[in-house]
Amino acid sequence: MIDATDVFKAFQPHRGDAIVTTSGTVGSHWANVSTKPNRDLRLGSSMGQTVSAAFGVALGLPEEQMVLFDSEGALLMNLGALASIAGKAPKNFYHFLLDNEMYATTGGQPVPNAANIDYAGLAKSVGYASTHHFTDLEELVTSIGEIMKEEGPVFISIKINPEVQNLPMALRERSGGRSRIETIRNFQKEFGIASV
């Protein structure tokens, strides 16, 4: 398994100007690696909805690469989104799944049947243009540049080490960064999107 921070560090040199959003506990590490915060779409507390939001951005801004670092717990809450994404086939959509086999944000409960689910296989079977699976950091590092040149939708499943959160939400250290409102306003400004 791979540390999530190492996944983000491997991806960063190949980001270009891609829009990036994350989900799950480990997604908070992206803010420490990103060099283009106005192109980061922070959607904290959106478990199960981030995939649909990222898909919508990919459709709405087809000239921009859209990268989602998803978590398997969140994806399982909205598994039908895979079929919708494959059906619309956005060429600019890169769907990374960081799989730690548990619901780390809510205390480490195991994801049912976690060791047997082939997420890349699911994405392939519904029609993603390209799918990949990694358990080794070196293999990921040497492959990620070519993956980011592929035509989407692309699905990349990565087994990561869990980072379990056991403290109640109110007692957890808040990750720095912008609020959701600030994120949206900065995003609108970056892409010239008028507020309604």
Image (cartoon, grey):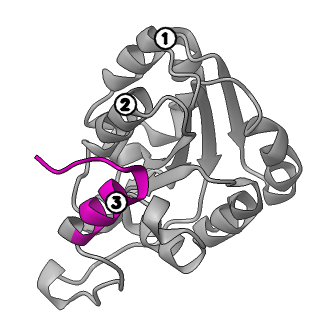
Q: Amino acid at mark 1?
A: Val
Is residue 2 part of the magenta span, yes or no? no
Residue 86 % position (x, y): 47, 15
Q: Identify the residue at image location x=16%, y=51%.
A: 195
Tell me the element at label 3.
helix
Q: Amino acid at mark 3?
A: Lys
**Residue nearest the viewer, comparing 40 with 114:** 40
Task: Name the residue carrying label 1.
Answer: 126
Task: Name the residue carrying label 2.
Answer: 60
Specify whether residue 156 is in view: yes
Is residue 194 part of the magenta span, yes or no? yes
Marks 3/1 in contact by CB < 8 Å: the verdict is no
User: Range of the magenta residues?
Assistant: 182-196
Residue 145 % position (x, y): 82, 46
Residue 20 % position (x, y): 50, 54
Relative side of 102 to 178, left or right: right
Could you tell which of marks 3 and 2 lies nearer the N-terminus?
2
Are there few (<14), some (14-19), or many (20+) residues within 10 Å of tag 2? few
Q: Amino acid at mark 2?
A: Gly
Relative side of 17 to 22, left or right: right
Could you tell which of marks 1 and 2 lies nearer the N-terminus?
2
- Foreground mark, 3 or 2? 3
Give the quadrant of the N terminus. Answer: bottom right
The answer to which quarter of the image holds residue 183 is bottom left
Distance in Å between CA atoms under marks 3 and 2: 15 Å
Task: Name the residue carrying label 3.
Answer: 189
Distance in Å between CA atoms under marks 3 and 1: 35 Å
